[in-house]
Image: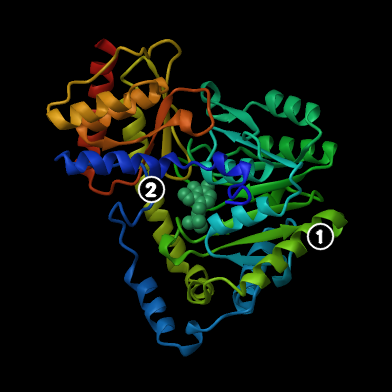
Amino acid sequence: MRQKLLSEGAKELSYEIREIVKKANILQKEGVDITWENIGDPIQKHAQVPEWIKDIIQRLAADNNSYGYCDSKGVFKTRKFLAQKNNQHGGAQITADDILFFNGLGDAISTLYHYLDATSRVIGPSPAYSTHSSAEAAHANHQPLTYKLDPKNNWYPDMQDLRNKVEFNPNVVAILLINPDNPTGMVYPKEILDQIVQLAREFDLMLISDEIYHHITYNGARAYALSEVIGDVPGIAMKGISKEMPWPGARCGWIECYNRDKSLEFDQLCNALDDAKMIEVCSTTLPQMAIPEILGDPRFYEYREKLNEETGWRSTFIADTLSEVPELIINKTYGAFYNTIVFKEGVLRDDQSLEITNPQAKVRVEEWVEDVPLDFRFVYYLLGATGICVVPISSFCSDLLGFRVTLLEEDEELLKKTFTQIRDSIREYLDS
Ligand code: PLP
């Protein structure tokens, strides 16, 4: 090629949640039966979308308008509905013009970071959800910039670490929160949100809050929306239907921009995002048309409550089962549908293993564990020996060693079998 093709930032793109699938697929071909604990897709885990939601979508699919492009920013009626829904909190108020639809939040995330100045950084939580950390790092052509979530303190943010990094890194323009959090299942208490808003105000930063799991809380928790706590600080909330409805295949999510009138530069960024979507024409129409009908129906909240209760039960079962291994740090979760399990310092070594009975799988795993972080080693052995596919936590921009599981398995017997097997495999691995 006459010129370099690939941008430097491209090397920051990684998504272990799907990378591990390639390994699992190889083992599946060798005859290993895989239990998928890697991806947060409720549909893949056998969740059934209620019939009344399917009826609404079927009716809309028969409406000719749902086949057309929509307004670049998104269907007006839907944006108006969502603005009113937000304004009911009495926090930061918005209009339909402050909402912009995307083809899933993945699209919103990559577009937002793409249009930030290359020298401006967004500091986000570690362990980090890779769609954010990889896209932000690729835009800055640098490694992700993160603050620590502390597994020894309910996964709450280490506020001193966050303050130091904001204070000594003048390139930081925004703080990212994921609330409820992927991968830890932590829900930010209001006092911590207030402190983060205060920090943003003090250093003249904007806030970004990924709220895709907003209605997924349990074990007595409730998630505060950014708009409830943000006061006069500029900020963006990211929302979507992939997890809550759940309809990840719709590729539909949106952003809400708060306090545009408080900062000209922030307002210009929001306008640039509108323009970027205009160049693409618009996002998927049909799912947007369905939102007011579904989220405006009281049955939606009854349905969510039932699902949340079930997720809470699974969360407790998983935490109780794995807590029986003293070498692990386990937290109960309160939101989203993941738990991140951490190995205590020093318990993992590079000579530990599990017995793999399938000879071809054994050869593969032994090849893969050459020169990898110690939690990848555990994850590959677990995959080879049991077929259980989890994601190593060091791949979430973290110094911690551990793995992420989902709380999505609806089949109670299979859930019990999977997590008892994980517990027993950890014991065997640590004793090997
Ligand atoms: N944000 C978070 C925190 C997620 O966990 C995910 C998906 O797992 C997304 C965004 C992406 O959502 P979407 O399906 O809307 O692209």
Marks 1 and 2, how far apart at CA: 42 Å
- Please provide percent x and percent y for residue 269: 77, 57
Q: Quadrant of the C terminus?
A: top left
Q: Earlier in the sequence, mark 1 or mark 2?
A: 1
156 or 149: which is nearer to us? Answer: 149
Q: Is residue 178 visible?
A: no
Circle count: 2
Q: Amino acid at mark 2?
A: Glu
Q: Residue at x 72, y 68 (%)?
A: 275
Q: Is residue 4 visible?
A: yes
Describe residue 48's horizontal placement relative to residue 334 as left or right.
left
Q: Residue at x 61, y 78 (%)?
A: 77
Mark seen at residue 268: 1
Q: Quadrant of residue 153?
A: top right
Q: Amino acid at mark 1?
A: Gln
In this view, 179 is above or below 420: below
Of the residues tagged 1 and 2, which is closer to the observer? Answer: 1
Which residue does the numbered mark 2 point to in the structure image?
A: 309
134 or 310: which is nearer to us? Answer: 134
- Please provide percent x and percent y for residue 66: 49, 82
Characterize the local packing of mark 2: few (<14), some (14-19) or many (20 or more) Cα atoms within 10 angstroms.
some
- Please provide percent x and percent y for residue 51: 32, 71
In this view, 164 is above or below 389: above
Describe residue 39's horizontal placement relative to residue 335 as left or right.
left
Describe residue 218's horizontal placement relative to residue 31 as left or right.
right
**In the structure shown, which secondary structural element does the residue marked by tag 2 occupy?**
helix
